[in-house]
Image (spheres, grey):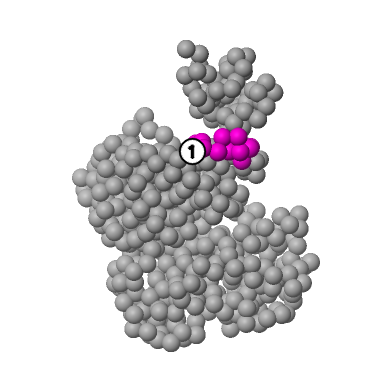
């Protein structure tokens, strides 16, 4: 039997095209996008608009970051073969990456109808829903994917993460441990267990983690993830030298993979501060009063402050939203100039248009309650334009003891690379950049940029919470004192901590003694000791 006869996906190909198609399929498995495009292009020259060749071209474009070209090729494939679930799965991936999540979800739903036993439509739906903060729906989709493919680790790990975000820690623990039963060196499973900070790993867990971390046959992503987890587990057991060594190794590996350009980043901060010094008066000074932005350093208590506000009956906690950055990125693309170069050309009407765009994109967070929080920490970099774009928005800056903040960043595995958190000097420089950018914004608009102290909240919770609510123009509500009981999805590394009552002592840096002297020195060099 010929390959075309045995594989219906190759039906319609002339015999001369079959070797090229089979080579293209092998190149897809090897991740060789350039060979896929060349070989599938040759197939199309012999069999114009063949749906499988178009699908392979779409996958290759997607893998290379050419998402619009991927979407176009996959749409042509779908037009020729509308009942093909695989094409719809890949088309949904391209649509999602082109910034069209609703159309992507429709494609995946249709793929699920056509192939209900295939795990990928349900996994993709679950992943997209989780990113949108629809955690309950995500859990349902991911559970279905795991049921269909028990060995598909990405679905099982993401299900564990979603369960953590929903506060269902026992179920999350079971899925992470099931993943480890299937693969004891699954770095993401160890990461998930370690990140449930109110459920420390046992000493037996730590020993197993250390054993697998030292294996020679594991990939770099697993080794890095296990390094951060081992640092956390060792710290919990008072083994500070071992914790420091594991974290130092993990951070060094990430830094080698993608070095952070501290000087270049500081120059970008300078440019943004200068460009936002003079902005036009807003047309509508009341625009944006629905929004409370929570910005500042990661690991500075921002999730805790959001959880307190989200316990208020007037506020929806939306967690970390990409919308502000997306609005400005799209405006940069429209103008053909990067942010902040075009700021001086924008008039009051432009800023109002952009503010309304942001509010439209985030409208679903105001369906149940009139106000919402946007807790993307790095929005401090964009806060300067908010006084023209969303002039009535409140911008809370959270701060915590510099040493504790810096050490907590160093211990946290951030997946977006390059990242400032892998080096003590980079952390200190980034923290200083954050504070000086917010100081410039505060000087220009002091009424809407209050500073929130993590330590002050721990010392006197009720007073600090009353002041926080008053700052945001909210009446006091006793539910905010019991913030840990608020039933919401928390999609950050602090998901477990904010479901617990406040603890008076959350510091961890002191246990390391002189090991952290280089970090103390780095902070001192930028005036943050």
Q: Classify residue 479 as left or right of residue 220.
A: left
Whether 411 is drawn above or below 486: the answer is above
The residue that appears at 34% across and 40% down in the rendered structure is: 148
Q: Is residue 80 magenta?
A: yes
Q: Under tag 1, what secondary structure?
A: helix
Identify the residue under disc 1: 85
Tell me the residue at 31%/36% (across/down): 183
Q: Nearer the viewer, residue 162 or 202?
A: 162
Whether residue 390 appears in magenta in the rendering, the answer is no
Which residue is depicted at the point 33% across and 32% down? 215
Q: Nearer the viewer, residue 484 or 518?
A: 484
Dot 1, how many residues are within 10 Å of its Cα: few (below 14), some (14-19), or many (20+)? many
Residue that extends furthest to the top in the rendered view of this protein: 1
Magenta region, main secondary structure: helix
Image: 498 above or below 417: below
Residue 518 appears in the figure:
no
Question: Which range of residues does the magenta coloring cover?
Answer: 73-86
The location of residue 203, given as percent across then percent down, is 21, 48
Q: Residue at x 47, y 52 (%)?
A: 128
Question: Where is residue 361 drawn, in percent x and y?
Answer: 58, 65
Total count of labels: 1
Q: Residue 60 location in percent, x, y? A: 59, 34
Q: Answer yes or no: is residue 3 visible.
A: yes
Residue 249 placement, left or right of 32 = left
């Amino acid at each position: 039997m010929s390959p075309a006869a045995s594989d219906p996906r190759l039906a319609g190909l002339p015999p001369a095209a079959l070797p090229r198609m089979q080579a293209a399929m092998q190149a897809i498995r090897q991740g060789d996008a350039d060979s896929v495009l060349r070989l599938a292009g040759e197939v199309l020259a012999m069999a114009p608009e063949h749906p499988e060749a178009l699908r392979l071209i779409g996958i290759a474009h997607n893998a290379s970051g050419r998402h619009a070209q991927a979407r176009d090729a996959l749409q042509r494939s779908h037009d020729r073969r509308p009942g093909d679930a695989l094409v719809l799965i890949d088309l949904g991936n391209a649509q999602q990456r082109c910034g069209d999540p609703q159309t992507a979800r429709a494609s995946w739903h249709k793929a699920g109808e056509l192939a209900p036993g295939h795990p990928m439509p349900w996994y993709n739906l679950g992943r997209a829903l989780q990113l949108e903060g629809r955690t309950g729906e995500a859990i349902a989709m991911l559970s279905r994917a795991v049921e269909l493919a028990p060995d598909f680790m990405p679905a099982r790990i993401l299900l564990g993460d979603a369960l953590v975000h929903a506060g269902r820690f026992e179920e999350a623990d079971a899925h992470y441990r099931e993943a480890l039963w299937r693969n004891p060196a699954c770095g993401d499973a160890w990461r998930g267990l370690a990140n449930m900070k109110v459920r420390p790993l046992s000493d037996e867990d730590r020993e197993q983690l250390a054993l697998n971390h030292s294996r020679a046959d594991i990939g770099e992503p697993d080794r890095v993830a296990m390094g951060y987890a081992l640092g956390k587990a060792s710290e919990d057991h008072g083994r500070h030298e071992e914790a420091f060594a594991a974290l130092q190794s993990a951070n060094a590996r990430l830094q080698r993979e993608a070095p952070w350009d501290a000087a270049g980043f500081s120059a970008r901060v300078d440019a943004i501060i200068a460009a936002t010094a003079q902005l036009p008066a807003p047309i509508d000074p009341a625009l944006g009063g629905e929004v409370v932005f929570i910005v500042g350093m990661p690991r500075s208590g921002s999730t805790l402050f959001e959880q307190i506000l989200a316990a208020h009956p007037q506020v929806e906690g939306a967690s970390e939203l990409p919308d502000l950055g997306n609005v400005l990125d799209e405006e940069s693309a429209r103008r053909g100039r990067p942010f902040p170069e075009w700021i001086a050309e924008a008039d009051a009407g432009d800023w109002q248009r952009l503010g309304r765009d942001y509010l439209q994109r985030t409208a679903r967070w105001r369906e149940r309650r009139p106000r919402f929080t946007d807790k993307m920490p790095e929005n401090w970099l964009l806060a300067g334009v908010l006084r023209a774009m969303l002039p009535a928005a409140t911008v809370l800056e959270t701060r915590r003891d510099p040493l504790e903040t810096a050490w907590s960043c160093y211990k946290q595995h951030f997946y977006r690379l390059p990242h400032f958190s892998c080096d003590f000097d980079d952390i200190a420089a980034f923290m200083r950049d954050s504070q000086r950018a917010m100081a410039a914004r505060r000087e220009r608009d002091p009424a809407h940029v209050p500073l929130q102290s993590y330590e002050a909240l721990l010392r006197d919770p009720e007073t600090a919470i009353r002041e926080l609510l008053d700052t945001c123009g909210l009446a006091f509500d006793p539910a905010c004192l019991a913030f840990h009981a608020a039933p919401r999805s928390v999609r950050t590394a602090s998901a477990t901590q904010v479901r617990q009552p406040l603890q008076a002592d959350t510091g961890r840096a002191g246990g390391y003694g002189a090991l952290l002297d280089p970090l103390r020195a780095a902070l001192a060099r930028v005036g943050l000791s």
